[in-house]
Amino acid sequence: MTSVQTSQLPTAEDLRGRARAALQALGCRVELGEPGAHGVHASTPITGDVLFTIPETTPEQADAAIAEAAQAFTTWRTTPAPVRGALVGRLGELLVEHKAELATLVTLEAGKITSEALGEVQEMIDICQFAVGLSRQLYGKTIASERPGHRLMETWHPLGVVGVITAFNFPVAVWSWNAAIALVCGDTLVWKPSELTPLTALACQALAERAADDVGAPRTVSRLILGGREVGERLVDDPRVALLSATGSVRMGQQVGPRVAQRFGRVLLELGGNNAAIVTPSADLELAVRAIAFSAAGTAGQRCTTLRRLIVHRSIADGLVERIVSAYRQLPIGDPSVEGTLVGPLIHERSYRDMVGALERARAEGGEVFGGERHDFGEGSFYVAPAVVRMPSQTELMHEETFAPILYVVTYDEFDEAIALNNAVPQGLSSSIFTLDMREAERFMAADGSDCGIANVNIGTSGAEIGGAFGGEKQTGGGRESGSDAWKAYMRRATNTVNYSSELPLAQGVHFG
Ligand code: UN1
């Protein structure tokens, strides 16, 4: 990759000051140790500096946190759901009040541009509001009984402690999807955030505890543990954790899933995506280019919903690639906290190395690469121009998720071929089609269309609203979080048969004595 030297970044001291101010405004009192000290390193991809060192949770403290959440569950489960909703409602209000400060921390730790960081906090506010409504709508069913004088029904009850493991790229929203829904469902939770984003997690915890104090709920309904694999494993293996909701790589899911299943715990997995968009000859290309740029280059390609593959009809491919490449050239790359920046940094050097490696492989496989060069602001940070890569066909490389802004482009001739290419990868999170032909749009969303958990028409693959269920199929893990009836994963279902007659008819016409 060639290097382009660009403007200055803020100093580490400046960033430390911003973090301190935000934490203080958020009411988060945490011991901020020297960068070199032992513990969890709160770093920033903006400059690559370690800002502070935070005390790490020991495995014993993790066990104690699970015990506290398990104890809190014994009273929280019988607290009326609308009363539980009041806690989540208060959390939502606090998030409205502190939206900017929390977004500042998201920008500092995850490197998101301000607008996307604010959007992430908005996503938290949205799910809190959704959950408050849900707290009065945890409906069961009444089912027709085959026996006279009998009532058959389904009731939903709190499940237990929910373990939540989240990734760096949505350091607060994904926690809130789980926390807001779990709490109104009567569960308590223990959260292990990414080691890369401890400050945003501490800030959320401070807000959650304040919300609890404000409504008179126990603080222990929501616990935070900070650390790496070892503390995460406590959540995975502890039988008191009834549901483990984990977001991250396919490899992480492959390790966690069977371990939780071994103890018959439940899992909700949101793993890798490898999302494609089909662009058909009838597409509104102006709209498609804007949607593609946001989905593929936004968040520097670090969303699980990022658009990674473009499947374009041969007749329009040259023109479309030209337009995307020219749109990409206009994307301001740099300090994500500066207004106007649209592409911030990669999270760390490993991501950059993965991107370099993928582009090298693409070239070796006959790909033509546009963009992808590093913008060298200094040694510790990794800013890249988003890349567009025209590939001769959909190769093995394209079956892998590289968590960086690389958009591979392949062409198709027949519509069936486009759908087959969309579905040919092991992951199944998001997908979209750009078309004005209703037959193509409907087919894309039909049983023999896209096999993904999300299938959009004339919008990109990323940026889902909280109202729908979020998640995907195949190696994406099958879990659904957030809206719709995703709440059912956080509760246990009981089937109740009530006999209000004086007879005892048996089901299926069985006679016994
Ligand atoms: C993720 O990248 O893990 O649909 C979540 C989106 C966001 C959530 C992404 N609402 O892009």
Image: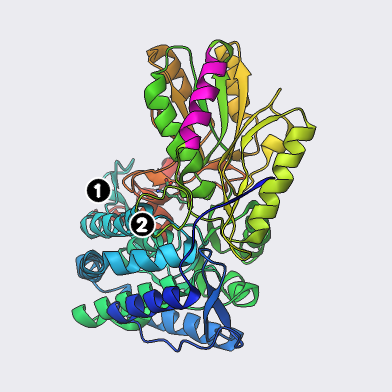
Image location (x, y in percent) of residue 300: 51, 48
On the image, the x and y values in percent for residue 321 come to 55, 24
State yes or no: residue 300 in magenta: no
Q: Residues within 10 Å of mark 1 (few under 14, many from 20)?
A: some
- Snapshot quadrant of residue 92: bottom left
| Res 199 quadrant in image | bottom left
The secondary structure making up most of the magenta span is helix
Q: CA distance from mark 1 to mark 2?
A: 61 Å
Q: Residue at x 45, y 15 (%)?
A: 440
Identified at 42% across, 75% down, the residue is 14
Q: Quadrant of the N terminus?
A: top right
Question: Does label 1 point to a residue whose CB lies under 8 Å from ligand 1?
Answer: no
Left or right: where 54 falls relative to 286: right
Residue 130, quarter of picture = bottom left
Nearer to us of marks 1 and 2 is 2
For label 2, the residue is 114
**Hey, what amino acid is under mark 2?**
Thr
The span shown in magenta is 316-329
Residue 149's disc is 1
